[in-house]
Amino acid sequence: NNTYYLGKQLAKAMQMALVANVLNCTSCGVWSSSIVNMIEGLIDTVFSSGPDPNINPFLYERRYGGIVSYNGWNLPGCPWKLGPTPNGFLADFGNGIYSDHHFHYGYWVYSAAIIATLDPDWLAPGSQKLESILDLVRDYANPASTDSFFSQFRHKDWWVWHSYAHGLVATGVGQGQESSSEAINAYYAMYLLGLAVKDQHLIDVGSVLLSMEIYATKTFYHVIPDQNVLYPPSFEQFTIVGQRLAGISAYITYFGSNSSFIHGIQYIPITAVSLWYLDPVWLKYELPVFKASNFSTWQTYPYLCFCVAGEAIIESKQDAFVDALMLESFWMDQGMSKSWLYFWIMAQPQLN
Protein backbone atom coordinates (compact mmCIF):
# COMPACT_ATOMS: atom_id res chain seq x y z
CA ASN A 1 0.00 0.00 0.00
CA ASN A 2 2.99 2.32 -0.53
CA THR A 3 2.11 4.71 -3.35
CA TYR A 4 5.59 4.47 -4.88
CA TYR A 5 6.10 0.70 -4.80
CA LEU A 6 2.51 -0.01 -5.78
CA GLY A 7 2.87 2.38 -8.71
CA LYS A 8 6.00 0.54 -9.87
CA GLN A 9 4.23 -2.81 -9.65
CA LEU A 10 1.23 -1.48 -11.56
CA ALA A 11 3.56 -0.32 -14.32
CA LYS A 12 5.36 -3.67 -14.35
CA ALA A 13 2.07 -5.53 -14.70
CA MET A 14 0.88 -3.27 -17.51
CA GLN A 15 4.17 -3.70 -19.39
CA MET A 16 3.63 -7.47 -19.23
CA ALA A 17 0.10 -6.96 -20.58
CA LEU A 18 1.56 -4.85 -23.37
CA VAL A 19 4.08 -7.56 -24.28
CA ALA A 20 1.33 -10.18 -24.31
CA ASN A 21 -0.77 -7.94 -26.54
CA VAL A 22 2.10 -7.40 -28.99
CA LEU A 23 2.76 -11.17 -29.21
CA ASN A 24 -0.85 -11.45 -30.41
CA CYS A 25 -1.44 -15.15 -29.74
CA THR A 26 -4.72 -16.51 -28.34
CA SER A 27 -3.38 -17.40 -24.90
CA CYS A 28 -1.42 -14.13 -24.77
CA GLY A 29 -4.60 -12.19 -25.47
CA VAL A 30 -6.37 -13.88 -22.57
CA TRP A 31 -3.40 -13.19 -20.31
CA SER A 32 -3.24 -9.55 -21.37
CA SER A 33 -6.97 -9.08 -20.73
CA SER A 34 -6.76 -10.71 -17.29
CA ILE A 35 -3.90 -8.41 -16.26
CA VAL A 36 -5.76 -5.34 -17.49
CA ASN A 37 -8.93 -6.33 -15.61
CA MET A 38 -6.99 -6.99 -12.41
CA ILE A 39 -5.16 -3.65 -12.51
CA GLU A 40 -8.32 -1.74 -13.42
CA GLY A 41 -9.98 -3.16 -10.31
CA LEU A 42 -7.04 -2.33 -8.09
CA ILE A 43 -6.86 1.28 -9.28
CA ASP A 44 -10.62 1.67 -8.91
CA THR A 45 -10.36 0.44 -5.30
CA VAL A 46 -7.63 2.93 -4.39
CA PHE A 47 -9.56 5.86 -5.86
CA SER A 48 -12.94 4.91 -4.41
CA SER A 49 -11.94 3.75 -0.92
CA GLY A 50 -12.61 5.71 2.23
CA PRO A 51 -9.83 6.41 4.79
CA ASP A 52 -8.22 3.01 5.25
CA PRO A 53 -4.50 2.59 6.04
CA ASN A 54 -4.55 -0.90 4.51
CA ILE A 55 -5.71 0.43 1.15
CA ASN A 56 -3.99 3.83 1.53
CA PRO A 57 -6.33 5.76 -0.80
CA PHE A 58 -5.64 9.12 -2.39
CA LEU A 59 -7.00 12.24 -0.71
CA TYR A 60 -7.30 15.85 -1.79
CA GLU A 61 -5.26 18.08 0.56
CA ARG A 62 -6.58 21.64 0.71
CA ARG A 63 -3.76 23.63 2.28
CA TYR A 64 -1.33 23.31 -0.61
CA GLY A 65 -3.76 21.98 -3.20
CA GLY A 66 -2.85 18.46 -4.23
CA ILE A 67 -3.39 14.72 -4.04
CA VAL A 68 -1.72 12.95 -1.11
CA SER A 69 -1.81 9.40 0.20
CA TYR A 70 -3.87 8.68 3.29
CA ASN A 71 -0.89 7.21 5.14
CA GLY A 72 1.41 10.04 4.10
CA TRP A 73 -1.08 12.65 5.27
CA ASN A 74 -2.37 10.95 8.42
CA LEU A 75 0.94 10.17 10.12
CA PRO A 76 2.14 12.63 12.78
CA GLY A 77 5.01 14.77 11.63
CA CYS A 78 3.38 16.45 8.65
CA PRO A 79 3.83 20.25 8.87
CA TRP A 80 0.14 20.81 9.63
CA LYS A 81 -0.30 17.92 12.09
CA LEU A 82 0.90 17.59 15.65
CA GLY A 83 2.32 14.36 16.99
CA PRO A 84 5.26 12.65 18.69
CA THR A 85 6.86 11.25 15.50
CA PRO A 86 9.24 13.84 14.06
CA ASN A 87 10.00 11.68 11.01
CA GLY A 88 6.39 10.79 10.32
CA PHE A 89 6.55 12.69 7.05
CA LEU A 90 8.63 9.85 5.61
CA ALA A 91 5.53 7.68 5.20
CA ASP A 92 5.29 6.95 1.46
CA PHE A 93 8.67 8.71 1.11
CA GLY A 94 7.19 12.02 2.22
CA ASN A 95 4.10 11.90 0.02
CA GLY A 96 2.13 13.78 2.68
CA ILE A 97 4.46 16.76 2.34
CA TYR A 98 4.56 16.63 -1.47
CA SER A 99 7.92 14.92 -1.84
CA ASP A 100 8.42 12.80 -4.97
CA HIS A 101 4.88 13.17 -6.26
CA HIS A 102 6.00 13.15 -9.90
CA PHE A 103 7.99 9.95 -9.23
CA HIS A 104 5.06 8.19 -7.58
CA TYR A 105 2.21 9.36 -9.77
CA GLY A 106 4.18 9.01 -12.98
CA TYR A 107 3.95 5.24 -12.58
CA TRP A 108 0.19 5.41 -12.00
CA VAL A 109 -0.40 7.65 -15.01
CA TYR A 110 1.88 5.49 -17.17
CA SER A 111 -0.13 2.41 -16.14
CA ALA A 112 -3.42 4.17 -16.84
CA ALA A 113 -2.17 5.22 -20.28
CA ILE A 114 -1.41 1.59 -21.21
CA ILE A 115 -4.81 0.48 -19.90
CA ALA A 116 -6.51 3.20 -21.96
CA THR A 117 -4.61 1.96 -25.02
CA LEU A 118 -5.64 -1.66 -24.51
CA ASP A 119 -9.14 -0.94 -23.13
CA PRO A 120 -10.28 2.50 -24.37
CA ASP A 121 -13.67 2.27 -22.66
CA TRP A 122 -12.07 2.26 -19.19
CA LEU A 123 -11.12 5.94 -19.41
CA ALA A 124 -14.07 7.16 -21.42
CA PRO A 125 -14.25 10.94 -22.05
CA GLY A 126 -15.97 12.71 -19.18
CA SER A 127 -15.86 9.65 -16.92
CA GLN A 128 -15.01 9.88 -13.23
CA LYS A 129 -12.14 7.44 -13.76
CA LEU A 130 -10.53 9.70 -16.34
CA GLU A 131 -11.00 12.72 -14.08
CA SER A 132 -9.33 10.83 -11.21
CA ILE A 133 -6.28 9.99 -13.32
CA LEU A 134 -6.15 13.56 -14.63
CA ASP A 135 -6.16 14.77 -11.01
CA LEU A 136 -2.85 12.93 -10.52
CA VAL A 137 -1.48 14.72 -13.58
CA ARG A 138 -2.80 18.05 -12.28
CA ASP A 139 -1.08 17.37 -8.97
CA TYR A 140 2.44 17.22 -10.43
CA ALA A 141 2.12 19.01 -13.78
CA ASN A 142 -0.93 21.27 -13.74
CA PRO A 143 -0.44 23.78 -16.58
CA ALA A 144 -3.27 26.17 -15.69
CA SER A 145 -2.60 29.26 -13.59
CA THR A 146 -6.38 29.62 -13.22
CA ASP A 147 -6.79 26.18 -11.60
CA SER A 148 -7.56 26.99 -7.97
CA PHE A 149 -7.38 23.36 -6.84
CA PHE A 150 -3.77 22.51 -7.76
CA SER A 151 -0.41 24.25 -7.82
CA GLN A 152 0.95 25.06 -11.25
CA PHE A 153 3.86 22.86 -12.43
CA ARG A 154 4.54 21.75 -8.87
CA HIS A 155 7.98 20.20 -9.39
CA LYS A 156 9.39 21.95 -12.45
CA ASP A 157 12.19 24.54 -12.23
CA TRP A 158 11.87 26.62 -15.39
CA TRP A 159 15.35 28.07 -15.03
CA VAL A 160 17.40 24.86 -14.98
CA TRP A 161 14.68 22.90 -16.86
CA HIS A 162 14.73 19.83 -14.60
CA SER A 163 12.39 19.10 -11.70
CA TYR A 164 12.92 19.13 -7.95
CA ALA A 165 11.48 16.48 -5.67
CA HIS A 166 11.86 17.53 -2.03
CA GLY A 167 8.42 18.99 -1.48
CA LEU A 168 7.86 20.95 1.75
CA VAL A 169 11.30 20.21 3.19
CA ALA A 170 13.81 22.88 4.16
CA THR A 171 17.45 22.11 3.40
CA GLY A 172 20.65 24.10 3.61
CA VAL A 173 21.32 23.70 -0.10
CA GLY A 174 17.88 24.24 -1.57
CA GLN A 175 15.53 21.90 -3.36
CA GLY A 176 16.90 18.70 -4.85
CA GLN A 177 16.16 15.71 -7.02
CA GLU A 178 17.73 12.28 -7.18
CA SER A 179 16.16 10.18 -9.95
CA SER A 180 16.23 12.12 -13.20
CA SER A 181 14.84 9.11 -15.05
CA GLU A 182 11.74 8.87 -12.86
CA ALA A 183 11.09 12.57 -13.45
CA ILE A 184 11.33 11.89 -17.18
CA ASN A 185 8.91 9.00 -16.72
CA ALA A 186 6.35 11.30 -15.10
CA TYR A 187 6.19 13.62 -18.10
CA TYR A 188 6.42 10.73 -20.56
CA ALA A 189 3.40 9.21 -18.80
CA MET A 190 1.53 12.50 -19.19
CA TYR A 191 2.32 12.52 -22.91
CA LEU A 192 1.27 8.86 -23.31
CA LEU A 193 -2.02 9.49 -21.51
CA GLY A 194 -2.72 12.34 -23.90
CA LEU A 195 -2.15 10.00 -26.84
CA ALA A 196 -4.33 7.29 -25.29
CA VAL A 197 -7.33 9.54 -24.57
CA LYS A 198 -6.77 11.79 -27.62
CA ASP A 199 -6.21 14.97 -25.60
CA GLN A 200 -4.01 17.27 -27.71
CA HIS A 201 -3.42 19.77 -24.89
CA LEU A 202 -2.15 16.97 -22.64
CA ILE A 203 0.09 15.76 -25.48
CA ASP A 204 1.51 19.23 -26.08
CA VAL A 205 2.21 20.12 -22.45
CA GLY A 206 3.59 16.65 -21.76
CA SER A 207 5.90 16.95 -24.78
CA VAL A 208 7.33 20.26 -23.58
CA LEU A 209 7.91 19.06 -20.01
CA LEU A 210 9.37 15.77 -21.24
CA SER A 211 11.76 17.46 -23.67
CA MET A 212 12.94 19.89 -21.01
CA GLU A 213 13.55 17.13 -18.47
CA ILE A 214 15.54 15.02 -20.94
CA TYR A 215 17.66 17.98 -22.01
CA ALA A 216 18.37 18.95 -18.40
CA THR A 217 19.20 15.34 -17.48
CA LYS A 218 21.77 15.12 -20.24
CA THR A 219 23.17 18.51 -19.24
CA PHE A 220 23.33 18.22 -15.46
CA TYR A 221 23.26 14.48 -14.62
CA HIS A 222 25.25 12.83 -17.41
CA VAL A 223 28.99 13.52 -17.28
CA ILE A 224 30.91 12.81 -20.49
CA PRO A 225 34.64 13.27 -19.81
CA ASP A 226 35.64 14.88 -23.11
CA GLN A 227 32.54 17.11 -23.11
CA ASN A 228 32.41 18.10 -19.44
CA VAL A 229 32.22 21.85 -18.79
CA LEU A 230 30.22 21.89 -15.53
CA TYR A 231 32.12 19.75 -13.05
CA PRO A 232 35.72 19.50 -11.82
CA PRO A 233 37.87 17.02 -13.78
CA SER A 234 37.99 14.79 -10.69
CA PHE A 235 34.21 14.25 -11.02
CA GLU A 236 34.48 12.83 -14.54
CA GLN A 237 35.42 9.38 -13.23
CA PHE A 238 31.88 8.96 -11.87
CA THR A 239 30.14 9.71 -15.22
CA ILE A 240 26.90 10.54 -13.40
CA VAL A 241 25.37 12.80 -10.75
CA GLY A 242 23.46 11.03 -8.01
CA GLN A 243 21.81 14.06 -6.44
CA ARG A 244 21.24 17.40 -8.08
CA LEU A 245 20.39 20.16 -5.61
CA ALA A 246 20.08 23.91 -6.05
CA GLY A 247 23.38 24.43 -4.23
CA ILE A 248 25.34 21.24 -4.91
CA SER A 249 25.68 18.17 -7.15
CA ALA A 250 26.84 14.97 -5.48
CA TYR A 251 27.80 11.37 -6.24
CA ILE A 252 25.56 9.77 -3.62
CA THR A 253 21.93 8.80 -2.95
CA TYR A 254 19.66 9.34 0.02
CA PHE A 255 19.56 5.59 0.63
CA GLY A 256 23.25 4.74 0.33
CA SER A 257 26.59 5.39 -1.31
CA ASN A 258 27.02 2.09 -3.18
CA SER A 259 27.69 3.01 -6.81
CA SER A 260 25.03 0.58 -8.02
CA PHE A 261 22.42 2.75 -6.25
CA ILE A 262 23.82 5.96 -7.70
CA HIS A 263 23.85 4.72 -11.28
CA GLY A 264 20.77 2.50 -11.17
CA ILE A 265 18.47 5.22 -9.82
CA GLN A 266 19.19 7.20 -13.01
CA TYR A 267 17.95 4.35 -15.25
CA ILE A 268 14.67 3.52 -13.49
CA PRO A 269 12.26 2.69 -15.13
CA ILE A 270 13.07 1.20 -18.53
CA THR A 271 10.47 2.28 -21.09
CA ALA A 272 10.47 3.31 -24.75
CA VAL A 273 11.54 6.83 -23.77
CA SER A 274 14.69 5.47 -22.10
CA LEU A 275 16.31 5.46 -25.54
CA TRP A 276 15.97 9.24 -25.60
CA TYR A 277 18.19 9.80 -22.57
CA LEU A 278 20.35 6.66 -22.32
CA ASP A 279 22.55 8.12 -25.01
CA PRO A 280 25.12 5.72 -26.56
CA VAL A 281 27.87 8.36 -26.44
CA TRP A 282 27.39 8.75 -22.69
CA LEU A 283 26.84 5.02 -22.11
CA LYS A 284 30.27 4.30 -23.61
CA TYR A 285 31.78 5.96 -20.51
CA GLU A 286 28.97 5.29 -18.07
CA LEU A 287 28.30 1.57 -18.45
CA PRO A 288 31.81 0.33 -17.50
CA VAL A 289 31.62 2.36 -14.29
CA PHE A 290 28.15 1.02 -13.53
CA LYS A 291 29.26 -2.57 -14.22
CA ALA A 292 32.18 -2.17 -11.82
CA SER A 293 29.76 -1.57 -8.92
CA ASN A 294 29.57 -3.97 -6.00
CA PHE A 295 26.51 -6.17 -6.68
CA SER A 296 27.09 -8.53 -3.77
CA THR A 297 24.09 -7.83 -1.51
CA TRP A 298 20.33 -8.23 -1.77
CA GLN A 299 20.02 -4.41 -1.79
CA THR A 300 22.23 -4.13 -4.88
CA TYR A 301 20.98 -7.12 -6.92
CA PRO A 302 17.94 -5.24 -8.35
CA TYR A 303 20.20 -2.83 -10.22
CA LEU A 304 21.85 -5.55 -12.29
CA CYS A 305 18.91 -5.58 -14.69
CA PHE A 306 19.63 -1.95 -15.61
CA CYS A 307 23.22 -2.83 -16.48
CA VAL A 308 21.81 -5.41 -18.85
CA ALA A 309 19.38 -2.88 -20.31
CA GLY A 310 22.32 -0.57 -21.00
CA GLU A 311 24.32 -3.42 -22.55
CA ALA A 312 21.54 -3.98 -25.07
CA ILE A 313 21.93 -0.42 -26.35
CA ILE A 314 25.69 -0.22 -26.96
CA GLU A 315 26.94 -3.81 -26.86
CA SER A 316 25.79 -7.12 -28.31
CA LYS A 317 22.13 -7.74 -27.67
CA GLN A 318 22.88 -11.47 -27.82
CA ASP A 319 25.28 -11.05 -24.89
CA ALA A 320 22.74 -8.89 -23.09
CA PHE A 321 20.11 -11.60 -23.56
CA VAL A 322 22.44 -14.23 -22.09
CA ASP A 323 23.10 -11.96 -19.11
CA ALA A 324 19.36 -11.41 -18.68
CA LEU A 325 18.72 -15.15 -18.65
CA MET A 326 21.19 -15.49 -15.79
CA LEU A 327 19.26 -13.05 -13.59
CA GLU A 328 17.04 -14.61 -10.97
CA SER A 329 13.50 -13.20 -10.79
CA PHE A 330 14.01 -12.13 -7.18
CA TRP A 331 17.03 -10.07 -8.27
CA MET A 332 14.87 -7.80 -10.42
CA ASP A 333 13.87 -4.27 -9.50
CA GLN A 334 10.26 -4.11 -8.30
CA GLY A 335 9.30 -2.22 -11.45
CA MET A 336 11.03 -4.58 -13.90
CA SER A 337 9.95 -8.03 -15.05
CA LYS A 338 12.15 -10.49 -16.91
CA SER A 339 9.54 -10.47 -19.70
CA TRP A 340 9.95 -6.73 -20.16
CA LEU A 341 13.75 -6.94 -20.02
CA TYR A 342 13.73 -9.63 -22.73
CA PHE A 343 11.32 -7.53 -24.79
CA TRP A 344 13.55 -4.45 -24.36
CA ILE A 345 16.67 -6.33 -25.45
CA MET A 346 15.08 -7.86 -28.54
CA ALA A 347 13.67 -4.48 -29.56
CA GLN A 348 17.14 -2.92 -29.81
CA PRO A 349 18.83 -2.64 -33.22
CA GLN A 350 21.62 -5.10 -33.83
CA LEU A 351 24.90 -3.27 -33.22
CA ASN A 352 27.34 -6.21 -33.07
Image (cartoon, rainbow, N blue to C red):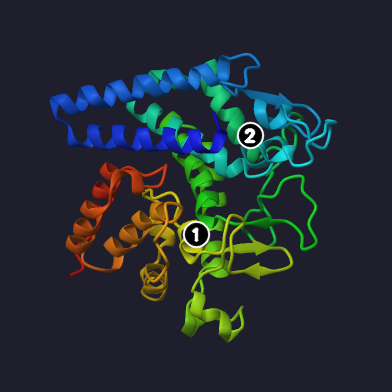
Please state the horizontal and vertical placement of residue 226, each as a whole percent of the image.
47, 85
Disc 2 secondary structure class: helix
Q: Which residue is mark 1?
A: 261
Q: Amino acid at mark 1?
A: Phe
Q: Is residue 121 visible?
A: yes
Q: Is residue 126 visible?
A: no
Q: Amino acid at mark 2?
A: Arg
| Left-right relation of 326 to 162 | left
Label 1 neighbour load within 10 Å: few <14, some 14-19, many 20+: many
| Left-right relation of 58 to 296 | right
Above or below, 52 relative to 343:
above
Q: How many marks?
A: 2
Image quarter hosting the N terminus: top right
- Residue at screen point 46% across, 39% down: 8
| Left-right relation of 76 to 198 | right
Q: Which residue is mark 2?
A: 138
Furthest residue toward front? 297
Disc 1 secondary structure class: helix
- Residue at screen point 63% across, 40% down: 140
Please state the horizontal and vertical placement of residue 155, each as a whole percent of the image.
67, 48
Q: Earlier in the sequence, mark 2 or mark 1?
A: 2
- Residue at screen point 40% across, 51% down: 302
